[in-house]
Image (tube, grey):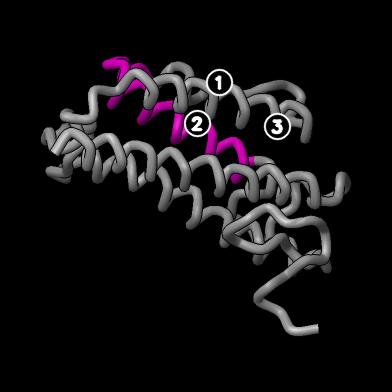
Amino acid sequence: MADTQTHAVQDIREHLERFRAVTLQTLEWVPEDRLRWSPQEGLRPFDEQFLHLARTEEYHVRGLLLGDWSRERYFTRPSPLTKEALRRVLNETRTVTLDALDHLDPSRLDEQVTVPEVPVPWTLRGWLWYLVEHEVHHKAQLALYLRLVGVIPPFFALAFPPGVRPDVRG
């Protein structure tokens, strides 16, 4: 059982790292003059999407794995909100996440966890997979945003060199 649990943590970690590489690639492909752009009023612009990804992950990791449910950091934003600042926040957040996963006792994965203000009785494993799915969800939105500003987005699952798309026939 311990081997299975350890493998499950490694699997979550692998997905988080792989998808974050694509998220960072997506950030690089956002035209500088479009960083504050969104397709319509009421939708998060590019920069806010990236910040939301980082802050949501940070909030959940600090709460789930470090026992700190403070929302103070969640509302902290770099000023100005540049690509460099967003890259830094995304990388710093991921460093905290990976360190916390490295120190996680895998036997905790099946524990029921309560997230403040969320009435969903999930296990720690379920919440960690939620973080993976959350990144995938927003990467899809960001890919659509890129297409709307005339940029072909990176491949969704792996960070390939620009123009390499195994899902598109040339």
> Is residue 108 located in the magenta-colored stretch of the structure?
no
Earlier-in-chain disc, 2 versus 3: 2
Circles 2 and 3 in contact, beta carbons < 8 Å: no
Circles 1 and 2 in contact, beta carbons < 8 Å: yes
Give the foreground label among 1 and 2. 2
Q: Indicate the position of residue 88 as horizontal and vertical percent values.
A: 68, 25
User: Compared with residue 117, is residue 79 higher up or lower down, i.e. above or below?
Assistant: above
What residue sits right under mark 1 in the picture?
76
Q: Residue at x 79, y 45 (%)?
A: 28
Residue segment shown in magenta: 48-70
What residue sits right under mark 3 in the picture?
87
Left or right: residue 14 compared with residue 88: left
SS state under label 1: loop
Q: Residue at x 64, y 44 (%)?
A: 21
Q: What is the spatial separation of the Cα atoms under label 3 and label 1, in whole angstroms? A: 15 Å
**Numbered mark located on residue 55 in the image:** 2
Earlier-in-chain disc, 3 versus 1: 1
